[in-house]
Image: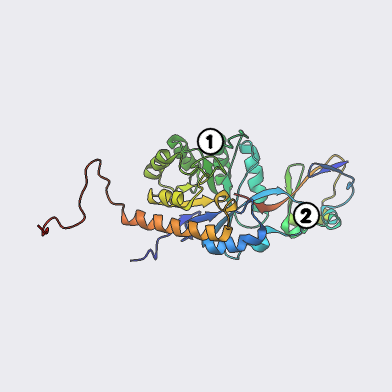
C-alpha cells in the first residue's frame, strides 16, 4: 500500500504523472512530495510509486 | 505633498501598498474584489493537502502582479516550517514566505525560538523571509541576524480581532529594529490598523477582521483608507499630548468684553 495525503492507495506501480491524471489533479497547481522529498515537475513521468511510499500532494489555499 | 515615493522594500521588491491581505475563511469569489478594494500588492496563502473535490484554485482569483506570501501554518517546529516553505516555493509563485510556527493550539502563539531557526535556514536558501513572532526585542534582533526581510509581531492572538494588545512592545520594535515592522494578527478594526500605522509600522496584515465582517470588500476598503490615514499621520508627525491642562487653539487676544 501507498499513503497518499494520509490515505491508503493502491497506486503502486503507477508513475506520479499517471496517478495525478487518473485522480484528477491539475499537475500545474500541485507539488508532489515523495517520502518527504519534493519531486521536480519534470520527473513526474519517470517517478514510479512503490509499495510503502508516503506521498503528499499539496496546493495553495486561502490563509492568513 | 502626497506620498508619491512612500514605499517599502521586502526582498528587493518595492511596495507602495501597506496593506497585506489574508485570503482565509472567506469565499474565493470575494478574493479578487477584496484585493482590489484593499489596493493590496501582497496576499497571504496557506499550503495544504490538495483534493480533487475542489475544482477551483485560489490562484485563479488573485489578480496578476500581486505578490504571493505563502505561510507555514500547520508547522509545529522549524523543520516543518522549512518543509512547507520549500513546497510553497516549488509551486512556482516566488520565494516569499511568512514563517508561522505554533506549538500551542489554544492561543496559537508563535514559537519564537523555532521561528529564529527556520528564518536562518530559509534565508540561507534564498527565501524572502517574513517571520511572524511574539513581540520581543531580543528575538527581533536575532531574526535580523538570521536574515529576515521584515519582522511581523502579533497585535493580539490570531483571529481574535482584539487589536493592539501588545502596542508598547511593538513600539519598541518599531523604534529599535531597522527592518520593516509589519503588524500581523489580532488587528480587528480599521481604527486599530490606523493606530499601528501612526506608531510607525511599515504595514498591516489582516484577514479575520475582513472575513468575519459583514461585507468583505467594503471592509477591505475601510482598512485601506485607515492604513493610508495612519501612514500620512505618521509621516506628518502627530501633535503633542499635554500631560495636564489645556491649550487654546483660538487667538489669545481680541476677546469681546
Chain letter of the residue beneath label 2 in the structure image: A
Q: Residue B40 carries which label?
A: none
Q: Which residue lies furthest to the front in this view?
A: B257
Q: Is mark 1 on a helix, strand or loop?
A: helix
Which part of the image, by quadrant, shows the N terminus of chain A?
top right
**Callout 1: few (<14), some (14-19), or many (20+) C-alpha neighbours within 10 Å?**
many
Residue at image point 79% right, 56% down: A25
Calculate the distance from the C-alpha at mark 2 to the C-alpha at mark 1: 37 Å
Which residue, given by chain and number where applicable, does mark 2 sit on? A43
Q: Nearer the viewer, residue B222 or B148?
A: B222
The answer to whether mark 2 and mark 1 are in CB contact below 8 A is: no
Can you give x and y, in whole percent of width and height, for residue B256 in the image?
A: 11, 59
Q: Which of B215 and B76 is in front in this view?
A: B215
Q: Can residue B41 be seen in this view?
A: no
Which residue, given by chain and number where applicable, does mark 1 sit on? B112
Can you give x and y, in whole percent of width and height, for residue B54 in the image?
A: 76, 56
Amino acid at each position: 500500500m501507498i499513503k497518499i495525503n494520509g490515505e491508503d492507495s493502491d497506486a503502486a506501480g503507477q508513475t506520479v504523472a499517471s496517478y495525478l491524471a487518473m485522480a484528477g489533479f491539475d499537475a500545474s497547481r500541485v507539488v508532489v512530495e515523495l517520502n518527504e522529498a519534493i519531486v521536480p515537475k519534470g520527473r513526474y513521468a519517470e517517478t514510479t510509486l512503490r509499495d510503502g511510499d508516503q506521498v503528499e500532494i499539496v496546493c495553495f489555499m486561502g490563509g492568513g | 505633498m502626497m506620498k508619491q515615493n512612500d514605499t517599502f522594500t521586502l526582498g528587493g521588491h518595492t511596495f507602495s501598498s501597506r496593506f497585506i491581505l489574508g485570503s482565509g475563511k472567506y469565499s474565493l469569489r470575494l478574493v479578487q474584489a477584496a484585493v482590489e478594494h484593499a489596493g493590496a500588492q501582497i496576499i497571504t496563502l496557506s499550503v495544504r493537502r490538495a483534493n480533487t473535490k475542489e475544482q477551483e484554485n485560489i490562484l485563479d482569483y488573485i489578480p496578476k502582479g500581486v505578490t504571493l506570501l505563502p505561510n507555514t501554518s500547520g508547522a509545529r517546529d522549524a523543520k516543518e516550517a522549512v518543509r512547507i516553505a520549500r513546497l510553497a516555493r516549488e509551486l512556482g509563485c516566488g520565494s516569499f514566505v511568512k514563517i508561522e510556527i505554533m506549538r500551542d493550539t489554544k492561543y496559537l502563539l508563535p514559537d519564537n525560538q523555532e521561528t529564529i531557526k527556520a528564518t536562518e535556514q530559509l534565508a540561507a536558501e534564498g527565501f524572502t523571509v517574513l517571520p511572524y513572532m511574539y513581540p520581543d526585542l531580543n528575538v527581533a534582533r536575532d531574526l535580523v541576524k538570521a536574515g529576515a526581510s521584515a519582522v511581523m509581531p502579533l497585535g493580539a492572538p490570531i483571529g481574535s480581532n482584539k487589536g493592539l494588545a501588545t502596542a508598547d512592545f511593538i513600539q519598541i520594535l518599531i523604534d529599535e529594529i531597522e527592518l520593516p515592522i509589519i503588524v500581523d494578527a489580532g488587528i480587528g478594526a480599521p481604527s486599530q490598523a490606523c493606530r499601528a500605522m501612526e506608531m510607525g509600522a511599515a504595514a498591516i496584515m489582516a484577514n479575520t477582521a475582513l472575513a468575519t465582517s459583514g461585507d468583505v470588500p467594503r471592509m477591505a476598503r475601510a482598512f485601506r483608507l485607515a492604513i493610508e490615514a495612519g501612514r500620512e499621520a505618521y509621516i506628518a508627525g502627530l501633535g503633542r499630548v499635554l500631560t495636564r491642562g489645556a491649550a487654546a487653539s483660538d487667538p489669545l487676544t481680541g476677546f469681546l468684553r
